[in-house]
Image (cartoon, rainbow, N blue to C red):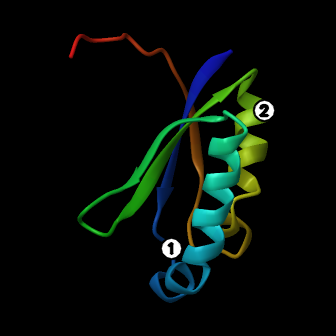
Amino acid sequence: MGYYVVLLPMLDEEKSAVYRPEHLAYLEEQRVRGRIFANGRFPDGSGGMVIYKADSLEQAQQWAAEDPYVLHGARRAEVREWEMVPGTL
């Protein structure tokens, strides 16, 4: 199991507003399945980020492609494998 960062840069603000409820429901479904490590939006409005826990890059890419934001052209998905180094809190 690895960590995969999905950057979701804004492509269309109007579509983003329309599909936000579907996107949030999708993320909640992924969270319940134990697939999400963290997610959030960028305060400057440029998009957001999801960090998935997946078995492969291809699996994370598939999950990112199924996000309603990506399916409907509101956002683009840029998927990168991430080698997390835990810190101390």
Q: Quadrant of the N terminus?
A: top right
Q: Amino acid at mark 2?
A: Glu
Categorize mark 1 by other alpha carbons within 10 Å: few (<14), some (14-19), many (20+): some
Q: Residue at x 74, y 46 (%)?
A: 63
Q: Residue at x 70, y 76 (%)?
A: 72
Residue 44, position in %: x, y? Answer: 24, 66
**Viewer-closest of 88 and 41:** 88
Quadrant position of residue 67: bottom right
Quadrant position of residue 68: bottom right
Q: Residue at x 73, y 38 (%)?
A: 33
Residue position marked by numbered label 1 in the rendering: 11
Secondary element at tag 1: loop
Residue position marked by numbered label 2 in the rendering: 58
Q: Residue at x 66, y 35 (%)?
A: 35
Label number found at residue 27: none
Q: Give the alpha-carbon distance from disc 1 to disc 2, as whole Å.
A: 23 Å
Relative height, residue 61 to residue 89 (above, below)? below
Asked whether disc 1 touches disc 2, contact meaning CB atoms under 8 Å apart, the reply is no
For the question of whether residue 8 can be seen, the reply is: yes
Residue 5 is left or right of residue 48, and the answer is right
Going from N to C along the chain, the mark reached first, 1 or 2, is: 1
Relative height, residue 53 to residue 45 (above, below)? above
Q: Farthest front residue?
A: 32
Residue 5 is left or right of residue 54, and the answer is left
Residue 77, position in %: x, y? Answer: 60, 53
